[in-house]
Amino acid sequence: MLAAHPQWQERARTDETARTWLINETLRLYPPTWLISRMVAQDGIYAGWRLRAGDELVLSPYVSHRDAQVFPDPEEFRPERWNGLHPRINEYFPFGAGARRCVGAELSLARLDHLVREVLQAGTVEGPAPTGMSTTITLVPQNLRLRFRSTKGGLPGQGDQFRPGPGPGLA
Ligand code: HEM
């Protein structure tokens, strides 16, 4: 998403709020966990639906995150939509919800912020959009080829390759 939107590289380089919007928007459009399933434990009426024990429920953040009522022009990558936006947990849940919500959510968000900041402070990212998405267990971009262009003359002996350092507190 960064490679396709150079103007957001500029904004996210120094602006923490821009980075938060950018990460939220990327997780909205491409939630790595695109499918979550549950098995119904006992017969009952749930949200108006009669369900039986053993029925399988499937929730898809990928689908819910494209609800135009909550996210107008849902296919558009628009980080600025997060300005003042507070979707409900059934509208935006890249890390799941409830008792089984991802235990790594806060760590992942902190690491993503750190990674984006480090990469952008060292240069820019370029490259064509991936040709598609593989939907096995997680959503993975296909044929993603990115080029990092250093604005600091590159790291010694590494040309245009970039290796982010350890995150905060993770030596
Ligand atoms: C962007 C990164 C990540 C995403 C999008 C993500 C997403 C999710 C989602 C959607 C669930 C809920 C699955 C369900 O309800 O069936 C989950 C659960 C879980 N995640 Fe993550 N995760 C991420 C990173 C991590 C990391 C870094 C860790 C470990 C440090 C982690 C550990 C876990 C664990 C242990 C659970 C199961 C929690 C439970 O069942 O009580 N995740 N994750």
Image: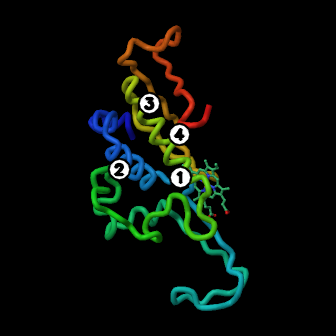
Do the numbered discs 3 and 2 sit on residues whose CB atoms are within 8 Å? no
**Disc marking residue 118:** 3
Position in image of residue 159 (x %, y %)? 48, 12
Image point (32%, 35%), residue name: 14
Q: Is residue 126 visible?
A: no
In terms of image quarters, where does ligand 1 lie? bottom right
Q: Nearer the viewer, residue 131 or 31?
A: 31
Q: Is mark 3 within 8 Å of ligand 1?
A: no
In the rendered image, which residue does mark 2 sit on? Answer: 21
Instruction: Please determine whether, in this image, residue 41 is positioned above or below residue 21.
Output: below
Q: Amino acid at mark 1?
A: Glu
Q: Is mark 2 within 8 Å of ligand 1?
A: no
Image point (68%, 90%), residue name: 43
Position in image of residue 55 (x %, y %)? 68, 80
**Disc marking residue 46:** none
**Disc marking residue 142:** 4
